[in-house]
């Protein structure tokens, strides 16, 4: 008997293996074609203005008369200006307080809302609403609550405990604290969601081992939860610190730097120098300094995180 060798039948179906787009012979330009609209918008509305601002920071900008090169005089004026130094201090203070307050409140909310219950999902969604509401709406809402008269919303509440009416954003002594509270209220839910994602990655076996060893809830939080969230703290610190250094919208809408410059930050000062006083060169120098400070903070924190990993 002879064994007949069977040959595979050609069905004409295409090869299921998808073609690979090599860098030389393939269609490497297809991804860039899809990215082209976004890249053009970024180039025209972000990178080109950034380059123009860098050039103008070394010039005395005179619209319709021609710009004059002044070198580093604009930077010297900005650094030596009392108004810029005060605005820089307010910016740092606002960034530190909002960062610490948002992270602390976000962690507390995350610990309270951790779980898989459907009720918790609804509560988490409701708590996240301040993040998705436009800042203009949030500022107007808090302006109404901060009404300085005795029948204002917050003044009516503090009047129940025997405290007198406060001026809030209209008082130089309380305006900065009022802006900080608004920023914490809006930023804490965002930190809460990131903390919830970090809590999901903490090893549950460590909680069980700590419970068997007789550790209290406070000790489990201190020795298990917080070390497990170390990377989350680093990420949130970078994001919140950058957001704090670039704070503008809430200050502009609530106080516009007032009263008497008590809430003036770098971004509102740059806006006034450039758009109100027409000192575009000095304003550009301040913007470049703010960008360098933000970049330096990001690089320093990234280096520290890398050393911790090593």
Image: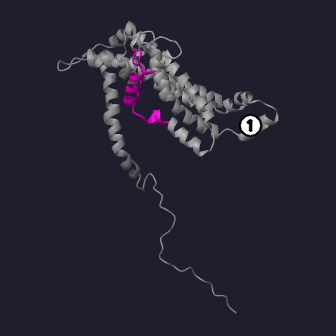
Q: Specify the farthest residue to the right.
A: 213
Counting from the top left corner in percent of width and height, residue 100 is at 55, 22
Q: Residue at x 56, y 79 (%)?
A: 8
Q: Main secondary structure of the magenta part?
A: helix
**Quadrant including the C terminus:** top right
Q: Is residue 135 magenta?
A: yes
Counting from the top left corner in percent of width and height, residue 53 is at 32, 23
- Which quarter of the figure has residue 153? top left
| Residue at the disc numbered 1 | 207
Would you say residue 92 is visible in this rendering? no
* Residue 232 left/right relative to 25: right
**Quadrant including the N terminus:** bottom right
Would you say residue 66 is visible in this rendering? yes
- Which quarter of the figure has residue 62? top left
Q: Is residue 224 magenta?
A: no
Pick the residue in front: 153 or 49: 153
Secondary structure of residue under mark 1: helix
User: What is the tally of numbered marks visible in this picture?
Assistant: 1
Q: Residue at x 74, y 28 (%)?
A: 219
Above or below, comparing residue 235 to residue 297 in the picture = below
Region of the chain picked out in magenta, as a range: 128-153
Q: Residue at x 55, y 29 (%)?
A: 236
Q: Residues within 10 Å of mark 1 (few under 14, many from 20)?
A: some
Q: Residue at x 47, y 76 (%)?
A: 12
Counting from the top left corner in percent of width and height, residue 191 is at 54, 31
Q: Specify the farthest residue to the left.
A: 64
* Residue 255 left/right relative to 227: left
Pick the residue in front: 104 or 310: 104
Counting from the top left corner in percent of width and height, residue 33 is at 36, 49
Above or below, comparing residue 294 to residue 3 in the picture = above
- Which quarter of the figure has residue 281? top left
């Amino acid at each position: 008997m002879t064994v007949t060798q069977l040959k595979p039948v050609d069905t004409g179906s295409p090869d299921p293996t998808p073609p690979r787009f090599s860098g030389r012979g393939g269609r490497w330009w297809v991804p860039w074609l899809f990215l082209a609209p976004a890249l053009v918008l970024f180039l025209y509305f972000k990178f080109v203005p950034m380059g123009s601002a860098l050039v103008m920071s070394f010039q005395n900008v005179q619209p319709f008369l021609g710009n004059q090169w002044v070198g580093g005089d604009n930077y010297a004026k900005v650094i030596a200006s009392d108004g810029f130094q005060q605005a820089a201090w307010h910016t740092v203070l606002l960034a530190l307080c909002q960062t610490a307050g948002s992270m602390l409140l976000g962690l507390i909310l995350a610990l309270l809302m951790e779980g898989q219950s459907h009720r918790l999902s609804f509560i988490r969604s409701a708590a996240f609403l301040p993040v998705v509401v436009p800042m203009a709406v949030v500022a107007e809402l808090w302006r109404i609550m901060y009404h300085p008269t005795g029948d204002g919303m917050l003044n009516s509440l503090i009047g129940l405990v025997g405290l007198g009416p406060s001026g809030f954003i209209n008082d130089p002594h309380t305006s900065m604290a009022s802006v900080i509270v608004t920023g914490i209220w809006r930023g804490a839910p965002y930190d809460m969601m990131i903390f919830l994602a970090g809590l999901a990655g903490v090893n549950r076996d460590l909680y069980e081992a700590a419970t068997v060893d007789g550790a209290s809830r406070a000790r489990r939080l201190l020795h298990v939860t917080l070390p497990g969230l170390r990377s989350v703290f680093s990420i949130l610190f970078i994001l919140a610190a950058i957001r704090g250094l670039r704070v503008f919208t809430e200050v502009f809408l609530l106080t516009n730097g007032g009263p008497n410059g008590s809430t003036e930050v770098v971004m509102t000062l740059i806006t006034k120098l450039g758009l109100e006083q027409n000192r575009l060169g000095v304003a550009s120098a301040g913007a470049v300094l703010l960008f360098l400070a933000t970049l330096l903070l990001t690089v320093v924190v990234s280096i520290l995180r890398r050393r911790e990993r090593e």
